[in-house]
Image (cartoon, grey):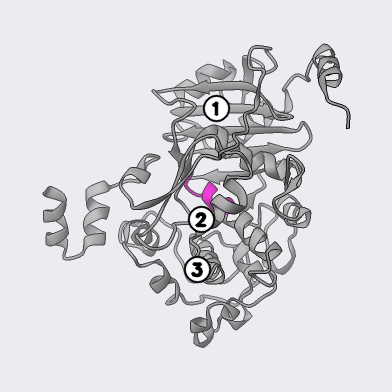
Amino acid sequence: MVGIAISLICGCGTYGRIIWYGFSGVEDFRIFPGRTLEASPHHFSFRDETRKGRVAHELNLPGHGQMSLEAILRDNETLAFLVIQDDALVYERYFDGFASDSISLGFSMTKSVLSLLIGCAIDDGLIGSVEDSVTKYLPELREGGFGKVSLLHLLMSTSGLDYAESGNPFGIHVYLYYCETCLERKALRFKLAEPPGTRFLYKSGDNILLATILRRALHGETITAYLQRRVWTPLGMENEGIWSTDGDQEKTWCCLAATARDFAKFGMLYLHGGKWQDERIVSQDWIRRASTADETDGASWQYQFQWWHPFRERSHYMMAGHLGQYVYVNPDTHVVLVRLGRSRGGLSSEQWWSLLSAVSGAVLPQPQSDLGKMIQQRPLD
């Protein structure tokens, strides 16, 4: 009743929800409409090697000195922390009542999932190429000068879109998070602030336009159903997921909820070059473009195809979301890490990146005796 009263006082349901719910949180999938992703009928489970001590219990965190890894995680509002190497789970911890089957909102990690689906749609012939103009799929934007904006500009966040990525409770970013059946309508009213290809400027509006394009290209199939068919089921996801919507369209910049283990599989898919158990999910070229730096046409080395690159001099890349959600890929050591949390705690983003880099770079190799057993047990072709 209080929420209804606030909505009536504000004269707008969206602003009433903004006031009522306040700051966003990892359990917001409970307050929004959503579409369910079903667990795969053929579960894929990582080999459990968590008892073999392959991850250091202590590490040196800049600004904090020598500390227990578990203490760092526990004291900084972590919910889940996984380390996976060569498809083996070598470290797994949960905190604050969270468990292996608990789901959490991934926030902007969801952008990386949408990028994957754009790659799948190109492979499937539903979308032509990243060089296509936005107006090929959204002709309503022709009068706004979007003819020169390509899908590549949207993927690299160099579109020139006039969109403020801020926590202003009365700004467009927060409004779109809480509004109902508004995403396509608002996206088709977006305007440009500068010519495309001028510079990199991170903004969720680019992702919203990509989602609107994908939705048109799917001809009635929902984005959730496409994810289920093309990725979720083939990857053998072990649990249900939820993709929050505005009541109509998926919130692809913020709002996919999954377990830590299932989020890890997106990172593993990229580490495997787009293949999963001998099945091609997305082209290797799509993975290459997301995992290597291209700074042409205004792009930033830090942001490639909606994946982040935390260090210029390293090959690492990651999915990253609000409040410290990470799927971190270290190709050098064949390691994927997942960190989910209620917030970043007392650590900055840069400190989390350093921690993830340190942990992923120091995983002990699998003992030779275990490798011998695997070779002996492997069936002959």
Residue 126 covered by magenta stretch:
no
Specify the amino acid type for callout 1. Phe
Dot 3 or dot 2, earlier in sequence: 3
Q: Which mark is residue 363?
A: none
Q: Could you tell me how far apart the alpha carbons at marks 1 and 2 are, in whole angstroms?
A: 28 Å
Q: Which mark is residue 212?
A: 3
| Secondary structure category for the residue under label 1 | strand
Main secondary structure found in the magenta portion: helix
Q: Pointer 3 and pointer 2: residues touching (CB < 8 Å)?
A: no
In the rendered image, the vertical position of residue 233 relative to residue 377, given as above or below: below
Residue 217 spot, x, y in % from top left: 56, 70
Q: Is 88 located above or below residue 224 in the figure?
A: above
Q: Mark 1 points at which residue?
A: 81
Judging by the rendered image, the residue that carries numbered circle 2 is: 225
Q: Position of residue 186 (x, y in %)?
A: 39, 71
At numbered mark 2, what does the secondary structure look like: helix, strand or loop? helix
Q: Distance between the residues labelled 3 and 2?
A: 15 Å
Dots 1 and 2: beta carbons under 8 Å?
no
Query: Which quadrant holds residue 164?
Result: bottom left
